[in-house]
Image (cartoon, grey):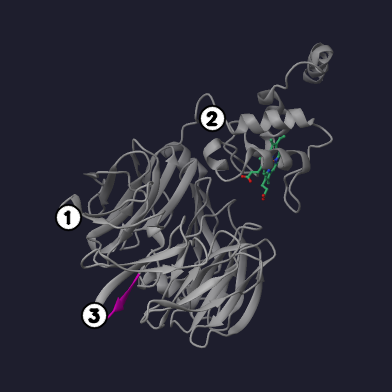
Amino acid sequence: MRTKTAAILAGLLVAPNAATAAPDPARLFTEHCAACHGGDRLGAIGPALLPQNLGRLKPGEAVNVILSGRVATQMPAFGDKLTEEDAKALAGWIFAPPERMPDWGVAEIDASRVIHGARLPAAPVHDSRPLNLFCVVETGDHHVTVLDGDRMEPIARFQSRFALHGGIKYSPDGRFAYMASRDGWVSVYDLWGLEMVVETRAGINTRNIAVSKDGKLIAVGNAVPAGVVILNARDLSPVQIIPTDSRVSAVYTAPPRHSFVVALKDTPEVWELPYDTLPLAVRRVPLEAHLDDFFFDQGYRMLMGASRDGRGQVVDLDAGRKVADLALQGMPHLGSGITFDWQGRRLMASPNLKEARITVIDTATWEVVRQIDTLGPGFFLRGHAASPYVWADVFMGPNKDAIHVIDKRGLEIVKTLRPAPGRTAAHVEFTDDGRFALVSVMENDGALIIYDAQTLEEVKRLPMRRPVGKYNVANKIRYEEGTSH
Ligand code: HEC
C-alpha cells in the first residue's frame, strides 16, 4: 500500500512538468520493459536490449516495435501507454551502452545453466537415418526443425533461444546438435531422443561456436564480454574463460591441429588455442592487417583471410606469418568459401558480399583462376564432392531471388533458378549423398525447396518461417569439401 501511495505521489509531483520535460528513458524502461527485458537489459523472456545485440535492428524499427509490438510474439504494443517521444527516447537509450556493462564470468555462466532432464535413449526414438538429418534454423518464429533428409519430412520442431545464429554444429558422432544465440545462449539438443539436453548462457553477445575434434569441448566466441569461453560439451559446465583484448568475430575448429582458431575484430592478430592440455594456452600470431573472416585449406595449415578493405592474405599458421597476398576485390566472404578439384588442382571459391562475382583461387599458387560474374553480391556457396555443380545465392539487390548453378568443370554458370520470384532465395545445402540440394526462401512465410541436384528440377516444397540455414549432419561431421565449417 505504501509503495503504491508513494508512486501516486511521485506521479503527482512530476505531473505538472510532464508535458514539457523530456522523457526519462531509464525510468520508462524500469516501469514498462524491465520485467521482460531484464533490469540490467540483459534479457529475460524478451531479448537483451544492448547496442551490440541490437546490431541489425535500426533505431527507427525499434520505435515501431515499441509502439506497435510484434505480432504473434510476447512483445506488446505500447502505443496507448507511451507517446512517440517516449518511444524515441527509449529507442535511443537502448542503442546507447549502459553506464556499466554487467559482469559475465564463471559464476554467471554456471548459474544460468538449465538441465532439461532429457532421457538420452540408447538408440534413436525415430527410424530416420541419423546422419542424413538436417537441422533447419527458422528465425521467423525462433524454432528449429529437424528434417529427415531421405523422406524430406520434418520429424521434430522445437523452440530455440531468441535469434539463433545459423551455423549449427554437431558432435563427432552426429548425435548432438550445438546451437548458439545472439544473446549468448548455447544449447545442446539430442537428435536421438529429440529433446533439449542442457543450455547455458556463455556470454552477453555471442558470435558463434566451434566443437573440438574429440567432441569434448565447445569454444564460444564472444563480442561481449570480449573473449572465448570453453565449455564441457556434455553438460556445458564452464571449463575456462580466455579474455581477448578485442571483440571476437569468429572461432573456428582446426581438427588436424587439435586447436581452436580465433578471429579478432579489433586487433591485427589471430589466436590459436591448442586444446590437448588444459588449461588451454594462447598462441598469438601477429598479422599485417585485421582479418576477421577465415577460410582454411584442407590441412588447416594455411589460413586465408580478408581485411575490411578487401585485401586478402594467406597466413601460414605453423610459421606464424603471412606467406602470400590474395588478389581479391570488394568484400569476399571467405568464411563461406568451399574447395573442389579442377584439372588436378585444388580450387577454392568464395562469394563476395559487395561485388557481383565469385572468385576462384588455386590453393597451390594463390592465384585467381577465374572471376565468375553473378547477378549480385552473394552470401553462401555450396558444393558436394558427389555433385558436378556449385550453388551460389544472390543475397542483395534486385536479383535476390536468384540462385546460380555453376558447373565445376567449366567454371561457369549453367543455370539460374528463381525458386520463388521476387523473394530472397539463399543458403543451399546438400543431402549427405549429394543427390538433393535444399534452398531457403528466407522470408517469414518462407519455404525450403528441395531440388534434384542432378536434373535441377524441383522435387518438394516445405513451408518454413524464415529458414536462415540448414545443416546436414553427415556433411558437417565429415567436413565435406563443399561446405564451410
Ligand atoms: C511482456 C514482455 C515484454 C515487455 C513488457 C516488453 N517486451 Fe520488448 N520484447 C519482448 C519479446 C518476447 C520480444 C521478442 C519478440 C520476437 O520474437 O521478435 C521483444 C522484442 C523487443 C524489441 C526487438 C528486439 C530485436 O532485437 O528484434 C525491442 C526493441 C523491444 N522489445 C523493446 C521493448 C521496450 C522498449 C519495452 C518497454 C517499453 C518492451 N520491449 C517491453 C517482450 C517484452
Residue 127, visible in the rendered structure: no
> Mark 2 or mark 1, which is nearer the start of the sequence?
2
Q: Secondary structure at mark 2?
A: loop
Q: What residue is shown with label 1?
A: 318
Quarter that holds the N terminus? top right
Residue, x 81% and y 20% (percent of image)? 4
Q: What residue is shown with label 3?
A: 344
> Mark 2 or mark 3, which is nearer the start of the sequence?
2
Q: Which mark is residue 97?
A: 2
Q: Which residues are magenta?
A: 339-343
- The reply to whether discs 1 and 2 touch (Cβ–Cβ < 8 Å) is no
Q: Which mark is residue 480?
A: none
Spatial distance from mark 1 to mark 2, Cα to Cα?
A: 39 Å
Quarter that holds the C terminus? bottom left
Residue 342: say if magenta: yes
- Residue 44 position in % (x across, y down): 62, 41
